[in-house]
Image: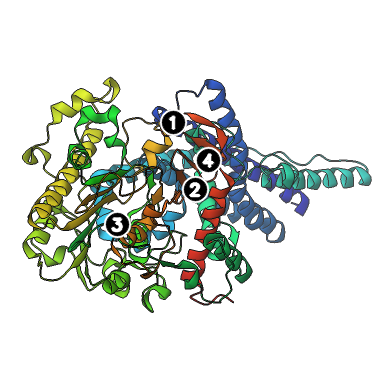
Amino acid sequence: MVRWEIFFRNIQQDLKLFLFVLGLLCILRIAFVGILSSYLSAQSAASDIIISLFYGLRMSLKSAGVVTLLSFLFCTLTSVIVHSQKVEKLRFALGSIYISLLVLLFHARIPFYQEFHTGFNQMIFNTLRDDITALFYTLVTDYDLPAFLLTTAIISYIFCRLLRKLLATRTYPAPEFSQAYQKVVFRFSVAAVVCFLMIFIRFGGSLTYAHSLHWENSAVSRDDFLNEAIIDDIQAIYRAYCIQERVREGTGGIKVDAGRVCSYGALLKDSAFTTNQIDDIFGKLAEGPKIPKPKHIFLIIGESYAQWPLLEQYGGLHIADGIKGIILQGNAIHIPAFVPNGAFTPMAVTAVVSGLSDVGLFPNYHPESYKEPYSTAIAPQFKKLGYKVNFWYGGVSSWERIKAFTLAQGFDNFYGIGDFYSKSGNVWGSDDRYLFEAIVSSFASDVPTLTVILTVSNHAPYSVDLAREGFDEAQTIAALPEEAKGDKELLERLGHYWYTDRQITEFVLKMHSKYPDSLFVITGDHADRTNISKTPTTFERYTIPLVLYGAGINKQTIPANVAGSHINIVPTLIELIAPKGFAYYSEGKSLTRGSDIGFSHNVWIIPDAVGKIQANNAEAFDGSLLASVKPESVQQKIDAMRALAWWRIEKGKIVE
């Protein structure tokens, strides 16, 4: 058989493989929308679904093109040079591996979206840094890993068999021509069509980059869920990779150089930045104490301690009665316009410990974090104020290098589950009851202390014996909407929120009774895990509470119109208690000095509005769209703070 005939028959096989994989991607997308249809917003219509499926088809041209390109290179072109029937086996093997990968990713994407309300993102690259044993146990107990793998294998086998049958169908010989010029024209036309299809597929249904479709411009729907459905799993992983690469270059795509750092520094300081020490940008002088200096300070970070249960419309659930009772006290203040540093617990820890915002560099693993404490770190600054600084964690000390990181950043002591008695818990750590009991029983009041506490119970696998703890299941069920009353998983999550809320507030009230000259700060590590509504408002989905309670606090201690995130906690505490002129360092601005912005990895908040960083619209806290768009100053401040945090972690102190 002549080489042209071999080439012509093989490109037909490549086309079969391409169409089969493209069809599978479309089937998986339809299944994704169907299985998770409850996440569709109320405003979405059939036309929105059709549009998302069409754009998803365009997006998946690229993903199907990946395996087709491999087949073209290693099967079609190889067969022209080396005449062998083995290329068909290789093509089928490539197709089978790719199909199995797609089915596996599809199975994983369902619980991933249910948990994080997004497709695969850059956090997947941090998975191997997590506690693999605990993660595996959670997958087995909470996500039915054996059934997951079994159904993946069965479905993959079925589609691989179908692919084999398709590839076994006949191919057509190249037409014969009597004239030489006709052969040349035909072969040139085939080559042109192949090139045309390569360009068309590469640009997602377009012939130019200007009109191409890619993950950055694919959000054509007004529904966030449908926008995620457009991006198939291969493109989602590519998106995660791109974002990760951008983080290495700068902050979320910002190109950071010394000149840009200087301009950002001037923006935040409201004056020219003239030195080459980045810490000079973070330097501040305290205005003077707002409350009597407390003997003890407790900063409690509750696992998945979201703010939405505090809202009036969810009061009937009675899962946040503890924190709401504290807020009602005269010596307490609640800041509602507050968001976490990021989507995961490590981001909360690194923000509180280091004082730097999340830029995807994971300070807990970065070498710079182990040279010396950052100037913005909480521990060394409170040592200067006369406090002994301790960290208590309900889990194991090796998780995310938390012990090594906190000690490297200046904490005097770290205590994990190996340091106290715990009768019950799960692979992530102790039940919160035993964590707080250990702190109470071992607490010494002879020297001033700052104690940071991180809980773990409100985390899958949800293993607290809620019936034994006294959770009123019937009361919570009665307050749920009809469609959610039978959702046992949701009820278990709500019960664990109730448990964490109760343990935190019991601890706070007990320690306040023993040590009335103490100050308590209560917040969460992140939200965005559990909501009653499948389409919560941005405020309900992302915000966390910030509550200050104790000696000297009143409703006027902090101005009413403020907003912040985890990086605003340390400067706020310092401004509350430090003497006038005390030199300190912080990336964030103190709430006492009118901080008007908070931000996480994807959300910004100001005193009267909230929105997505990637979007230009703004929402009121009740979810209604505001006529005004995101203020330009919001994006400028976010860019500036992220760039400075990135430089300090990645480049060090010197700006040059």
Closer to us: 214 or 354? 354
Q: Which residue is mark 3?
A: 290
Q: Which mark is residue 60?
A: none
Q: Earlier in the sequence, mark 2 or mark 4?
A: 2
Q: What is the three-letter code of the residue carrying label 4? A: Leu
Closer to us: 226 or 587? 587
Q: Earlier in the sequence, mark 3 or mark 2?
A: 2
Q: Earlier in the sequence, mark 1 or mark 3?
A: 3
Left or right of 37: which side holds 176? Answer: right
Q: Is residue 193 positioned above or below 357 on the image?
A: above
- Are the two marked residues, 1 and 4, in contact with CB atoms closer than 8 angstroms? no
Single out the mark in the foreground, 1 or 3: 3
Q: What is the three-letter code of the residue carrying label 1? A: Gly
Q: What is the three-letter code of the residue carrying label 3? A: Lys
- Are the two marked residues, 3 and 4, in contact with CB atoms closer than 8 angstroms? no
- Are the two marked residues, 1 and 3, in contact with CB atoms closer than 8 angstroms? no
Q: Residue at x 51, y 72 (%)?
A: 278
Q: Which residue is mark 4?
A: 163
Left or right of 242: which side holds 105? Answer: left
| Callout 1 secondary element | loop
| Callout 2 secondary element | helix
- Are the two marked residues, 2 and 4, in contact with CB atoms closer than 8 angstroms? yes
Single out the mark in the foreground, 3 or 2: 3
Q: Position of residue 147 (x, y in %)?
A: 29, 42
Q: Which residue is mark 1?
A: 623
Label 1 crowd bin: few (<14), some (14–19), many (20+), radius 10 Å: some
Q: What's the distance in space between the residues labelled 3 and 2, CA to CA?
A: 67 Å
Q: Which mark is residue 96?
A: 2
